[in-house]
Amino acid sequence: MTVRVLRADERPAVPWKNGGGLTREVASFPSQAGMSDFVWRVSLADVAEPGPFSRFEGVDRIITLVDGPGMVLTVDGTSHTVAERYVPFLFPGEAATGCRLLGGPLVDFNVMVRRGRAGAQVEIVRDRVVLSALAETTLLVVVLDGSAVFEASGLVLDRFDGALITDAREEALEVTGIAALVTLTGAAAEG
């Protein structure tokens, strides 16, 4: 199994596309792609103030509350309360989306895929999981709380660390806490 470790302390904070908050990119394809040319992008964002979300034409987004009291997202005029931690919420990136905070700043986990070029599924895991990346599939594990250990190698991931997995051999991961397992599919899934 090919595993590329993505340490949280090596990610710079950069302004959102619309300047309304900060994001830390975990991984993207192609690597180092910009906001207009990624096939997929996974990040953690700090949301300190209410306001509009950046628009991404032709992009599907999956957002998951990690820390904080939550938010109400208004997506094309329909309100959605995102207040339960670790519950992924899917919405179209081109939708007019506004955010109202429910009592203070928050951190969210954000997965974006270019529609028609890649797909994504986010699964929240809380214990042991066997990972296997199939052909044209990339797995990304990001620890949202606690830690995780790859059983075969003893490699430890701490909070907000990630691992990109890009081949088919199985590997067991013991999660002590909570991790997001992102399955990225498509001809250009590999990061």
Image (cartoon, helix red, strand yellow):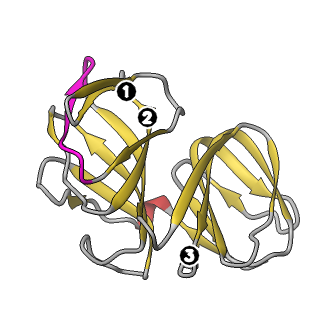
At x 50%, y 69%, the residue is: 118
The residue identified by callout 2 is 65
Horizontal side, residue 47 vs residue 112: left or right: left
Residue that extends furthest to the top in the rendered view of this protein? 103
Binning the other alpha carbons within 10 Å of mark 3 as few (below 14), some (14 to 19) or many (20 upward) gives many
Quarter of the figure with residue 60? bottom left
Foreground label between 2 and 3: 3
How much space separates mark 2 and mark 1, taking CA atoms? 8 Å
The residue identified by callout 3 is 189
Q: Are marks 3 and 1 in contact (CB under 8 Å)?
A: no
- Picture layout, residue 84 above or below residue 180: above
How much space separates mark 2 and mark 3, taking CA atoms? 24 Å
- Residue flagged by tag 2: what amino acid is it? Leu
Residue 15 at x, y percent in the picture: 18, 58
96 magenta-colored: yes
Choose between 47 and 72: the one closer to the eye. Answer: 72
- Determine the secondary structure under disc 1: loop
Earlier residue among tags 2 and 3: 2
- Picture layout, residue 135 above or below residue 113: below
- Residue flagged by tag 3: what amino acid is it? Ala
Residue 140 at x, y percent in the picture: 60, 62
Foreground label between 3 and 1: 3
13 magenta-colored: no
How much space separates mark 3 and mark 1, taking CA atoms? 31 Å
At x 39%, y 41%, the residue is: 108
The magenta region covers: 94-104
Residue 138 at x, y percent in the picture: 64, 71
Q: Are marks 2 and 1 in contact (CB under 8 Å)?
A: yes
